[in-house]
Image (cartoon, grey):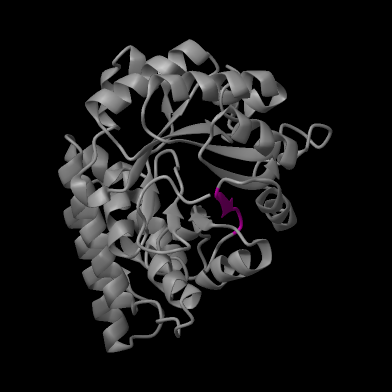
Amino acid sequence: MAFPFPLPYRVPLYLAPMAGVSESPFRRLCRRFGADVVVTEFLSAEGIRRENEATIAKLRFGGDERPIGVQIFGSDPAAMGEAAALVTDVFAPEFIDINFGCPVKKVVRRNGGSGCLKDLSLVEGVIRAVSRATHLPVTVKIRSGWSEELRDPVAIALRCQDAGARVLALHPRTRTQMYTGAASWDEIAAVVDALEIPVLGNGDIKTADDALRMREQTGCAGVMIARGSFGQPWIFTQARALLEGREMPPGPPIEERFAIAIEHARMAESYEQDPRGAAIEFRKHLGWYVKGVPHSADLRRQLHAVDSLAQVEGIFEAYLDVMQRGEPGGAEAPGGALSEREPALT
């Protein structure tokens, strides 16, 4: 079965929904670098149906982000249906995605996210309620099960398909695994063989080579990239080249990487109402952008203390100036000298 909305490539690349990361500025940037589909952060159905201001604000997206899906979570079928109807009528994305995969305690404590996987009848009920409430395609993101004892991704996926899911994304870890161990890509292949609807592979894609390898090993209809996009949105450009049999372009040099980071920061600053808050929230992205560059530990230390975009620009300019001069012992920027002796912040 084909994807339920037009896509430019046979094997699309998705930016995964990630809380605090896949906000509109990052989605726009990843679309520009070749992500074919993006999905919002996961949003509470209760927050949507009650029109919570902070939740509704996260539903904002621009035309350059399409095709886009809005991901919702919750364990009350009626509330999930109401939220889906509001999102459909007011925001009109290409699809509604249901989160059955989030492993964090505050979500599963209310039986949301991967907590639903303990009760597959509830999973079916949620999918059916959302499908009845919207004319948009309904897609789902799951894990392989709640625990090792309940691990059965094929059975879960078949129940989702039978309930009306049009696309299924599998992160092949259980909830109890969180992000430890290796994602079991063989389980993605098994789900691909069992289902008629398109299956997206997700998990442990850190490089463009991983994306190609997942496609070849599992036969998945599309590849969903999550943490592999952190600080390197160009992974989508690289993965597309490999999927098409072309030579993979190299990653950008440090100067260009910093320029992309600054552009991303400006987009985030424009998107948020509080410039200082935006800069503080953006610190995590800065840490990802400078990962692996010379003296990155000290560079991250400085960037993790910024509270304005001007400080970021100054730190980058000073770093590049010292590196271009080739001075020994690292670079010095506002906030202190760079020294490899100090530990990196994570």
State the residue lying farthest toward the bottom: 326
Residue 89 higher or lower than 96, as above or below: above
Q: Position of residue 55 (x, y in %)?
A: 32, 25
Residue drawn at point x = 31 percent, y = 48 percent: 67
State the residue lying farthest toward the right: 149
Name the quadrant containing residue 295.
bottom left
The front one of 113 and 3 is 3
Name the quadrant containing residue 220.
bottom right
| Number of marks in the rendered image | 0
Horizontal arrangement in the rendering, residue 275 relative to residue 207 (left or right)? left
Q: Position of residue 92 (x, y in %)?
A: 26, 33
The residue range painted magenta reads 198-204
Name the quadrant containing residue 176.
top right
Q: Position of residue 211 (x, y in %)?
A: 55, 66
Residue 156 higher or lower than 223, as above or below: above
Is-magenta flag for residue 203? yes
Is-magenta flag for residue 43? no
The front one of 333 and 171 is 171
Residue drawn at point x = 33 percent, y = 40 percent: 94
The front one of 76 and 165 is 165
The front one of 334 and 264 is 264
Residue 278 seen from this side: yes
Residue 336 higher or lower than 45, as above or below: below
Residue drawn at point x = 73 percent, y = 41 percent: 154
Horizontal arrangement in the rendering, residue 325 relative to residue 188 (left or right)? left
Residue 293 seen from this side: no
Q: Position of residue 69 (x, y in %)?
A: 37, 40
Horizontal arrangement in the rendering, residue 245 relative to residue 267 (left or right)? right
